[in-house]
Image (cartoon, coloured by chain):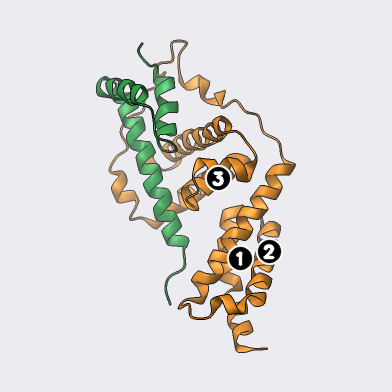
Chain colours: A orange, B green
Amino acid sequence: MSDFRSRVEGERAYLLRYASLQLRDRHSAEDVVQEALLAALAGEAGFAGRSNLRTWLTGILKHKIVDAIRRSSREASVAPDGDEFESLFDERGHWVDAPAAWTDPGASLEQKQFFAALEDCLARLPAKTAQAFTLREHLGLDTGEICKELSVTATHCWVLLYRARMALRECLEASWFKK
Amino acid sequence: MMLSCKEVTRLVSQGLDRRLGFGERLQLHIHLAICDGCANFRRQMLFLRKAMARLADLESPAES
């Protein structure tokens, strides 16, 4: 095995963990990592002169993840409403139970357990909602790009992101901030 | 026309994804100034963005 090849192989476990977190599906994660590693080996020349192999591989992997999400979104259809949070409001649209301030959220950002709770909450989101939110907040795509990746309208995209934020807020409030 | 809290939650969320119009920002501002629940909600949304960015940092590769 060439030196480059064994170094690339050495990053497989890391990449698999990265992809599993993004896709939340072991099989799809293995598929995208395989695709990324093959692309990396075929494109060794593209690495020349770059300092960090892991960073370069992660860049390739991100594109493969976006492709995978795009493929799976063609297969799954979605309900375009976003009104499942209706019950939080009364008939005039006021809060039934108005949000109270979270206690010292800044301190949570210093705690490992907080991020475990956040990942649990993310894992509970419906697939498409989670995909839109991941593309937006994790991979930093703008809504235009997300709409394109998921083949949905801009309005639908905002609904998905709204849904994700509402659900995560409730989940974190229950599992973390009200401990 | 006053916005309802429900409408405010949608605008706060959209404000994280697109540039709101002048009228939208004005109405949002007025509502948030007088509604503690929605002001808390907005702070929680900003916190969520920060937390997601931090999570992405934690997962991103460390320079070796």
Q: Is residue A54 left or right of residue B42?
A: right
Badge 2: residue crowd in 10 Å (few <14, some 14–19, many ≥20) = some
* Both marks 1 and 2 on one chain: yes
Instruction: Out of A171 and A165, give the one closest to the viewer.
Output: A165
Residue kind at label 2, given as amino acid type = Glu
Q: Give the residue at mark 2.
A: A30
Would residue A75 be seen by someone viewing this image from the given angle?
yes
User: Whole-percent x and y of residue A159?
Assistant: 54, 31
**Mark 1 to mark 3 CA distance (whole Å):** 25 Å
Which of discs 3 and 2 lies nearer the camera? The answer is 3
- First along the sequence among labels 3 and 2: 2
Residue kind at label 1, given as amino acid type = Leu
Residue kind at label 3, given as amino acid type = Glu
- First along the sequence among labels 1 and 3: 1
Q: Chain of mark 2?
A: A
Q: Give the residue at mark 3.
A: A145
* Both marks 3 and 2 on one chain: yes
Where residue A75 sits, quadrant-wise, is: top right
Q: Secondary structure at mark 3?
A: helix
Residues tagged 1 and 2 counted as in contact (Cβ below 8 A): yes
Badge 1: residue crowd in 10 Å (few <14, some 14–19, many ≥20) = many
Q: Report the disc number at residue A16.
A: 1
Q: Residue at x 59, y 71 (%)?
A: A13
Residues tagged 1 and 3 counted as in contact (Cβ below 8 A): no
